[in-house]
Amino acid sequence: MDLLNALVALTNFVIVPGLAYGSQLALGALGVTLIYGILRFSNFAHGDTMAFGAMLTILVTWGFQAMGITFGVLPTALLALPFGILGTIGLMLFTDRTVYRFYRQQKAKPVIFVMVSLGVMFMMNGLVRFIIGPGDQRFADGERFIIKARAFKEMTGLEEGLAIKTTQGITVITAVIVVALLFWFLNKTRTGKSMRAYSDNEDLALLSGINPERVVMYTWMIVAALATIAGVLYGLDKSFKPFTYFQLLLPIFAAAIVGGLGSPLGAIAGGFIIAFSEVTITYAWKKVLAYVLPDHLAPDGLVQLLSTDYKFAVSFAILIVVLLFKPTGLFKGKAV
Amino acid sequence: MTETLKHTLLFALVGVLILLEGATDALFFSGSWNSALVILNMGLISAIMAIGVNIQWGFAGLFNVGIMGFTALGGLAVVLTATPVIPEAWTAGGFGIVTALVLGALTIAAAVMITKVMPAGKPRALVLTAVLIAGFFVYRAIFDPAVSAIEEINPALQGNIGGLGLPVLLAWPAGGLLAAGAAWLIGKTALGLRSDYLAIATLGIAEIIIAVLKNEDWLSRGVKNVVGLPRPLPYEVDLQNDPSFVEKATGLGLDPVVASTIYVKAGYAVMFTVVLLVLLWMAQMALKSPWGRMMRAIRDNEVAAEAMGKDVTRRHLQIFVLGSAICGLAGAMMTTLDSQLTPGTYNPLRFTFLIWVMVIVGGSGNNFGAVLGGMLIWFFWIKVEPMGLLLIEAITSGMADGSPLKAHLLESASHMRLLTMGLILLLVLRFSPRGLIPEK
């Protein structure tokens, strides 16, 4: 019984939040890794792209709610998501046309692109603050829980409850669907194949008649969709605040590098590695240990390795370890 | 128009803008000499930070986005150097803290030794993990009680380890040293890898430094802030109570209260200018020296420089430490100017990316450009808000009063800052990538 209780507590506080956070990070890291693979620079504006997409979705959601349109038990934001994606695609293509394309034609060094992406980051950040303000926005509606802690306790007769939020369920399911679609696209369609070819060897791809501008355009569209979905899922699960999206940049980069920059599979693995390390290291293990260990060994303290404020330190430490021992990441990324 | 004349005029423009800020309240100027001096002081500090970043980026092409962290370490140095000694804290937990920190450092040193001495493979991984885990728990076992002992002492005012009670001016070089130490650690791990990795590593270390300052109450009182740090200049109130100062002020036809505030701010301005000039001179000498030429050679072609027998990674580490030390120095100066350390206010957009805008706009690779960029961009950073408000008022003047769009636009005018900075950065990168004062 105690072992079951421990397992439930572990699922409730570590596995479920870790899965949801990991899916969000994985989607974000996929965007970073695609930009890196195809446009060949680290996009510092990615966090703010997520914020922008989420903001558009929130605005449409509010519109729907005002008109009385809801999505039943699911959050209305899911209905608004396609509009958010379309808007973000528009902004990405506009940014590429007005900003990035010039440097591509110049064949500028990657570090110049990074610099430029800083400028874009500033502008997007300002835009989001200008439109929706720097404060917290909540936009989740519909049913809040799939399983409530109390219902679970009554159902199983265990002491520990298991609560799964709707948003956590939606996050994981959406992430699975999106990743499946993305891999189908990259592996089966002609455009996806040309994207991979371009990423692997630019010169050869150009020789075989692949239109680079087309590849770049599709990349931005996919990245916009991924960023918006990641942003909305994160916002639904936690809450929307522009500055937290900027701060997500670090775990997202860490996830992409740990997995190997330029490798989509690596980005997903990296996302979950970072998320689970953050959650396990900042979780207070007292409860779980109290169930598992015999009474006289039960811990006095919280058994929390690091306080939650240091969660960035966790992603950073993993990043450093990978950089030191395997600089190309777990899934052999590219080293430009 | 010759180059020199153009550059002189650009500097004169910044001077005129600051003078106008004090002299007139037309347009977006405030007409207060106090405000002009506040802008000048922070502009000088920004110029010093820009020199630090320019040394890294302009001389050597290193992309450091952790400036905020080094600045904050400078601030911490002020607390650790200049605040009075708290003997109770040292007797209560000082020994524990020092022992724990030394043990932590020894653990890491042991881990590094193991990696170097043992051959790669399963046994090494096992020993390494065992040493690290054991080290961590021993560290926590000694560290935690010492921390709670310290935090219990007079928590309303202190609750931290206190400082060394040294003069506050010593804190400035101390800030530089602290930042240099952190830069050495991070450079040792991330330099020599790909350029983006340094960027991401520095971004991370900056966040961690801020997290430490916010949470380690025993060190910096965390979000409770350390206020009332010692100052190198007299307090305004003391000046106002000093008969000879009041006499002099009235003799000049000034209100003693205004005169005292201006006196203090002008005093800081003089001190900061001296530091800036010394650093500028040193940076110029370094740029012209064989060392500077070598750095630029490495920046322009690493492979060729390596073929000539230059140790690229070592030189990079050297310049990374130097530039970060300058940022730490500037951070210590800033905390002295504020006479408080507020870890909650450090924001990467303001303390890292804005400095980058300064360097790029001023002209990367040129020290005078960095100084110009620092002062000019700082002026705009402060003044974009009133400018934006003017602009929005002009745009919305045609709209009906009370329309929600107008209200929203007026309310959001203050967020124009980031938008404008991004726009300036993109425009300069596109149309004048070498900046206002290009590298020669």
Image: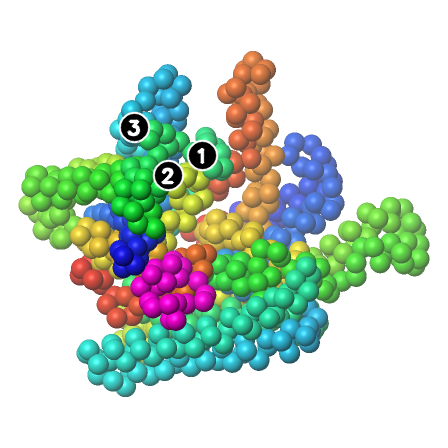
Q: Can residue A147 be seen in this view?
A: yes
> Residue at 35% across / 41% down in the picture?
A150
CA separation, marks 3 and 1? 20 Å
Instruction: Output the chain of dot 3.
Output: A
CA separation, marks 1 and 2? 9 Å
Asked if labels 2 and 1 touch by Cβ distance under 8 angstroms, the answer is: yes
Circle nearer the N terminus (1, 2): 1
With respect to residue A250, does A103 lie above or below? above
Percent of width and height locating residue A23: 26, 46
Q: Which kind of residue does numbered mark 3 sit on?
A: Val
Q: Quadrant of residue A306?
A: bottom left
| Residue B15 as seen in the image, left or right of residue B48 | right
Residue that numbered label 3 is attached to: A73
Say what secondary structure mark 1 lies in. Answer: loop
Say if the magenta span includes residue A288.
yes
Circle nearer the N terminus (3, 2): 3
Q: Which kind of residue does numbered mark 1 sit on?
A: Gln
Residue that numbered label 1 is attached to: A137
Circle nearer the N terminus (3, 1): 3
Magenta span of residues: A283-302
Q: In what quadrant of the picture does the N terminus of chain A appear?
A: bottom left
